[in-house]
């Protein structure tokens, strides 16, 4: 049995059932698995992954294993690991290092263990693994074929690295595929963030002033779902076009300084640090609920909150009551870590089906380029749109939906610039 470190192997049976449930909702990934289990294109290739250990991720891992890969895995957030899933993967023979509630030192220890088997491919969510390779495991770079990155924040980091010449091997920005960010980031984050808030609080959303910081793909999804549940939605932004879009979508737009005074529930979805800081906490109403759904826990400045608290206690799981020196109470969910994966189970399987099919395809492209001997120049790549359309087409078919096809005449028409009035 390969090496692993998980919380409790006895949870494996429960984890297996949970993974089997996710698998039954992920038909696109199942089709890829069926297609590649005979040809085993990943035979002889080693992938290190650093991505939330959830039931959906486990289905992705099973797909890689069936396609011939050797896999070593760690979680990409100290609070998102589902311990039963980690146990099930260990039992299935995956080298996995992940448990819920680890500290930062343990987090990096786990990443390093996944590098022990000298991977040729990395798979990231947030870029901590690839960053570790670039910083402290440079010896692995010469034999590295490439990497893939799941999320907006990670892609942002990698593009900055590429701009500054610091990136040393090619990566695919899986996040930037249409079938990832127009679905996972919008509908996935929309539903799972509300799910996390409800599991941690069970409050009524209807009638609440619901503040979403950031109107990117994720913020858009959260605001639209909160509105659908009857909340009065408020958006804070720094980008004029995004703020304008939010206004025309029917949300109120204001500065965080003003939103802080009226909000009942706050969700940060910006990818930027210090979105809610000390003075905002002081402005907030008694009973305000504050949480984050961005990748890192820097959006809410918890140090500031700690500095003005009189006392705190955990009222429910993932729900801490801070009593401030001004007497008001503020409720912080999941310690400011992504509430959807810490307090709930992350995005629904149906959405991750597409995100992870892109992950699989991107890793496959890297392996194919290696086999063909055409070394990809170091850069940040996006998968071709043709692959998006294939994934979306397959998804539609598995949903029992049919769409039209352009006729020959229509194709001729859209390719003919001379035809007008
Ligand atoms: C694994 C998940 C899940 C889930 O694709 C999403 C993304 O971009 C992330 C930022 O860290 C989280 C990731 N994600 C959301 N839900 N990964 N399993 N169920």
Image (cartoon, rainbow, N blue to C red):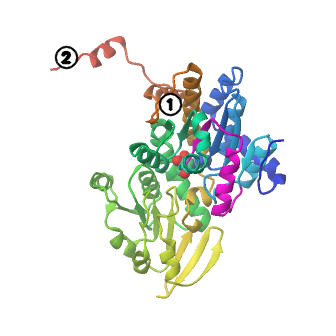
The quarter of the picture where residue 228 lies is bottom left
Is residue 269 in view? yes
Which residue is more in the foreground, 374 or 87? 374
Which residue is more in the foreground, 84 or 91? 91
Q: Secondary structure at mark 2?
A: loop
390, above or below 117, in the image: above
Give the spatial CA distance, label 2 vs label 1. 31 Å
Asked if disc 1 is less than 8 Å from ligand 1, the answer is no
Which residue is more in the foreground, 395 or 55? 55
Q: Sequence order check: which comes first, mark 2 or mark 1? A: 1
* Residue found at x 65% / y 22%: 35
| Percent x, y of residue 105 | 65, 62
Which residue is more in the foreground, 162 or 245? 162
- The residue wearing badge 1 is 392
State if disc 1 and disc 2 touch (CB < 8 Å): no
| Percent x, y of residue 203 | 55, 68
Q: Residues within 10 Å of mark 2 (few under 14, many from 20)?
A: few
Q: Secondary structure at mark 1?
A: helix
Q: Residues within 10 Å of mark 1 (few under 14, many from 20)?
A: some
* Residue found at x 54% / y 24%: 369
- The residue wearing badge 2 is 419
| Percent x, y of residue 66 | 72, 30
Q: Which residues are magenta?
A: 99-125
The quarter of the picture where residue 351 lies is top right
């Amino acid at each position: 049995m390969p090496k692993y470190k998980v919380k409790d192997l006895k949870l494996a049976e429960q984890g297996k059932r949970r993974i089997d449930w996710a698998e039954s909702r992920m038909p696109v990934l199942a089709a890829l698995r069926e297609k590649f289990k005979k040809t085993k294109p990943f035979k002889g290739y080693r992938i290190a992954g650093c991505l939330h250990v959830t039931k959906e991720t486990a289905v992705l891992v099973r797909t890689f294993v069936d396609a011939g890969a050797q896999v070593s895995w760690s979680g990409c957030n100290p609070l998102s690991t589902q311990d039963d899933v980690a146990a099930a993967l260990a039992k299935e023979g995956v080298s996995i290092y992940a448990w819920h509630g680890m500290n930062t030192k343990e987090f990096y220890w786990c990443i390093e263990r996944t590098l022990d088997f000298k991977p040729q491919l990395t798979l990231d969510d947030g870029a901590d693994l690839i960053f570790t390779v670039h910083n402290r495991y440079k010896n692995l770079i010469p034999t590295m074929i490439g990497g893939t990155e799941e999320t907006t924040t990670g892609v942002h980091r990698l593009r900055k690295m590429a701009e500054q010449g610091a990136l040393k091997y090619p990566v695919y920005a899986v996040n930037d595929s249409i079938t990832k960010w127009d679905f996972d980031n919008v509908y996935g984050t929309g539903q799972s963030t509300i799910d996390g808030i409800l599991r941690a609080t069970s409050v009524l959303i209807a009638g609440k002033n619901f503040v979403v910081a950031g109107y990117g793909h994720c913020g858009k999804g959260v605001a639209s779902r909160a509105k659908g549940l009857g909340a009065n939605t408020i958006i804070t932004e720094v980008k004029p076009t995004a703020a304008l879009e939010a206004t025309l979508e029917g949300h109120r737009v204001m500065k965080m300084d003003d939103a802080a005074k009226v909000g009942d529930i706050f969700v940060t979805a910006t990818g930027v640090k210090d979105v809610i800081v000390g003075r905002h906490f002081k402005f907030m109403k008694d009973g305000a609920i504050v949480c984050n759904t961005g990748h890192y826990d820097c959006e809410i400045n918890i140090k500031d909150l700690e500095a003005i608290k009189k006392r705190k206690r955990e009222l429910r799981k993932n729900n801490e009551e801070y009593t401030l020196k001004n007497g008001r109470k503020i409720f912080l969910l999941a310690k400011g870590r992504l509430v959807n994966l810490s307090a709930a189970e992350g995005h629904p399987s149906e959405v991750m089906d597409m995100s992870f099919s892109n992950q699989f395809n991107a890793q496959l492209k890297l392996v194919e380029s290696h086999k063909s001997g055409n070394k990809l120049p170091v850069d940040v790549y996006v998968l071709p749109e043709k692959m998006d359309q294939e994934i979306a087409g397959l998804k539609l078919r598995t949903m029992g939906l049919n769409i039209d096809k352009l006729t020959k005449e229509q194709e001729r028409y859209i390719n003919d610039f001379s035809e007008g009035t």
